[in-house]
Structures are given as structure tokens and as C-alpha cells.
Amino acid sequence: MWTEVDGSDSIGPKLSLADVVLPPAVGDGFAGLYGSAERPETAAEWVADMRGAIEREYDRTPTVDDLCTVEDGDHAFVGADGAQTYICVLDPLAYPFLTGETGTVRSTTPVRGTEVEFEVRADGVGVSHDDAVVSIGISEGVDGDEVSIERVYQEVCGFVQTFEDDAEYEEWAAEADGATTAVPAREGVAIARELADALFEEGAQRPGGGCSPDGGCC
């Protein structure tokens, strides 16, 4: 399945984080983690709460260097310089939009062990499995006593996964020790793109469209 560019500055499906509605249980978990006075109801509110909490903790916004890399992870970005693996799939999906580098994200699903590929090119985004979905979630019973980047990854990353289809997601979610929701894989790419722009210091760049020295990719 391939999504071509439409002549705009971004690639992938058009999406606003404000239009991505979070289930109440997921919003409650994020509110607990970030110490928010109100439950975020949309992905835009979630990202704003996360950015604010990290700014308060570190006096800065996240950068591409804060992406949670790990050896032998289930989610990898494969580019011109090789592969890097991550704990959750949103990090490698965000990477090309943070650096301007094109490449392929390979994500192994947690139940069936299927490899789902996302190809991010200058002229569009491709997903290997038409019915693939991406989950977003958070551990149960989280409080905001500490809002380090490491804590965010610890409580959230395990619940951000790729699945071959809704049936695999539902099987996994039934046993997951957290609150989760799922979106179509193409929408997951768009969320990663918009998250790169709204959360990170670098802001979103167009993969394959060139970059500046300040963008961390030259």
C-alpha cells in the first residue's frame, strides 16, 4: 500500500494531532504520568503535556538524541548508513522526519512475529501490510512523581507496537498490563510525523528533501 505526496510539504496521510481522540483510560494514564491537571483528550493535548513536563524537568525540549535506541530491538530504522533498533515503533517512524533521511522502518509484531515494513521516501510512504495497525498506550497506575525521559519510555514504549491486523492487536491488548488504543499503520506514520514537529527541538523535516546543519542530519 503506497501513499504518494500531494504537493504539500509533508508526506503520508494528512492528519492533525487534534483530530486523534484518546480513549479515557489512555488519557488518564498520560495525565498521571505527566502530572496534568486535566486528562488529555486528543493526541495534541497528550504531546503538549509531554513536552511541558520534559521542559520542566530538563529546561529543554527533546532532541533526536533522546530517541530510545537499544541493541536487538524489535523496531528498526534502516537507512543509507545501516540499521538502528529502538524499543518502540514511534521512534524509528519519527526519525526520518527529524533528520530528513529516507529509509525503511522494520517492525516485528509482538504476537505473531510478523515483520511489517514502512518505507519512507521523498515521494510518499509505503506499508507492507494493508491491515496493519499501530498501538499507543501506557502502563496502569502511573503517577507523575518523576517525569524523566527514561520514565516516559519505561511507562509508554512497551505499549507502542505494530500489529499485522486488528485481530493480532486485540489478542495482545487483552493481556496487556496497560491502557491502549490502535490506529491504522498509515495514520501511525502521520502521528510520528506530527509528533516530530510538535515535540522535538528539531521540528519535522521532509525526508529526502534536504536538511540544514542545525537539523542534526548533515
Image: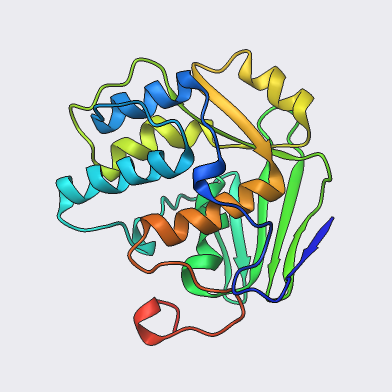
Relative placement, left or right, of 201 versus 20 is left
Which one is in front, 182 or 99? 182
The answer to whether residue 201 is seen in the rendering is: yes
Q: Quadrant of residue 122?
A: bottom right
Q: How many marks?
A: 0
Pinpoint residue 33: horizontal percent, then vertical percent.
30, 29
Q: Position of residue 11 (x, y in %)?
A: 65, 67
Q: In the rendered view, how is the structure colored? A: rainbow
Q: Quadrant of residue 161?
A: top right
Vertical placement of residue 70 versus 119, above or below:
above
User: What residue is shown at x 62% (from left), y 19% (from top)?
Assistant: 173
Q: In the rendered image, which quarter is residue 120 located in?
A: bottom right
Q: Residue at x 65, y 21 (%)?
A: 172
Compared with residue 176, is residue 133 higher up or lower down, i.e. above or below? below
Query: Horizontal and vertical percent for residue 108?
Result: 68, 42
Question: Which residue is at a point 56% across and 74% down the rendered structure image?
Answer: 206
Q: Say which residue appears at 47% left-offset and 67% top-offset.
A: 204
Q: Is residue 72 visible?
A: no
Where is the N terminus found, in terms of image quarters?
A: bottom right
Q: Seen in the image, is 97 located left or right of residue 197?
A: right
Which quadrant does the C terminus fall into? bottom left
Q: Nearer the viewer, residue 94 or 27?
A: 27
Residue 96 lies, in percent from the top left, at 55, 67
